[in-house]
Image (cartoon, rainbow, N blue to C red):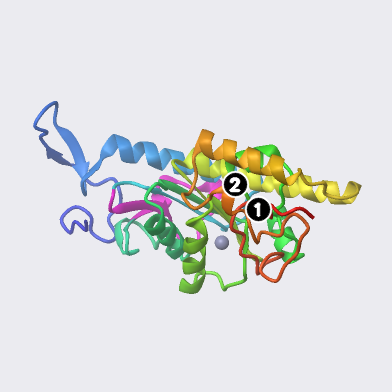
Amino acid sequence: MHCAQHCGPDRATSEAPVHITRRHGPPTSLVCGVRRPHERNLRQQILKFAHLCHERGLLVAKDGNLSVRLTDQLILCTQAGCHKGLLTEDELVIIDLKGNKVRGIGTPTSEMALHLACYERRPDVEAIVHAHPPMCIAHTVAGVSMAQCVLPEVLLTLGSIPTLHYERTGTNTLAEQVGEAIDKHDAVMMDRHGAVCVGKDLLTAFCNLETMEHTAKVLLAARQLGAVQELPADEAHALRTMGLERYGGPPSMMPSHCTNCSGCGRPSQAGLGPKADFTVARLSTPR
Ligand SMILES: [Zn+2]
């Protein structure tokens, strides 16, 4: 998709568009095969949700990154080292599915490998928000699982929230691990790092992030007040089934395979804490 004529590596987005004529309808302005209004709309959405992430305290300083599919072959993403609360259109970059820059100023975010791993695994994913929500991170630092069946809205929308074991930021190993987990989940936590939330659009990915941080706050407050009381296993199972019917979800996220999560107070070797292999919501076996 690289277009040397119009999309040199350091050309800004203000360059002249290429005019093509559709077989039907008026001429459409294209740059690198991207419809201008479509790109403009997605750029504005990235700015809006980046600003919201910062306003809501879901990331600070130059943390986090956002991306969206621009076409089948191109991703629009945030530049490395930009402040998300002050993000401007100049700080967005277009890359191909291998991570090569196609258009824009600056370097794509160093964490783009994990975005690309998610897009590769999940053709249904159109947008990704990676942020550093503090309460979620605190859970991972304390080694406390967030994969507990406590809140109905979480079971309806996300199922469980797995925590992946620690890997260094920006590495391919981390990207591979995230891609594998995103196969089964729309929202995952990286140990001592942050959240990766995906969706059919930026709003959905952002909502998943808000739900994660809200859940972390509720779990923390519940522990301070007493103990976390989980929903009965059959109710958790019914809610997850209802959620999959209502909102859909990753294909492997089926409640019938609700094992080895151990978020429900049955810690197992494979279950509790950062080493967890959280398949779905919780163990369905009685305590
Ligand atoms: Zn990060």
**In what element is the residue under mark 1?**
loop
Residue sitting farthest toward the front: 286
In the picture, residue 270 is in which quadrant? bottom right
Left of 21 or right of it: where is 114? right
**Tag of residue 229:** none
Amino acid type, callout 1 = Pro
Figure check: 253 above or below 168: above
Amino acid type, callout 2 = Leu
Label 1 residue near ligand 1, CB within 8 Å:
no
| Residue 55 seen in render | no
Residue drawn 77% across and 45% down? 218
| Residue 243 seen in render | yes
Residue tagged 1: 133
Residue tagged 2: 209
Along the line of sight, which residue is nearer the eye, 257 or 194? 257
Along the line of sight, which residue is nearer the eye, 12 or 166? 166
In the picture, residue 188 is in which quadrant? bottom right
Instruction: Give residue 94's position: percent from left, percent from top.
Output: 33, 54
Instruction: Give residue 137's position: percent from left, percent from top.
Output: 69, 59
Along the line of sight, which residue is nearer the eye, 232 or 193? 232
**In what element is the residue under mark 2?**
helix
On the rendering, which quadrant does ligand 1 occupy?
bottom right
Left of 162 or right of it: where is 273? right
User: What residue range appears in magenta?
Assistant: 72-94
Evaluate if marks 1 and 2 touch, with contact meaning CB atoms under 8 Å apart: yes
Residue sitting farthest toward the right: 226
Q: How far apart are the alpha carbons under marks 1 and 2?
A: 8 Å
Return the disc, 1 or 2, that comes first in the chain's sequence: 1
Left of 98 or right of it: where is 244? right
Instruction: Give residue 2's position: percent from left, percent from top.
Output: 21, 58
Along the line of sight, which residue is nearer the eye, 20 or 194? 194
Quick check: is 214 in the magenta stretch? no
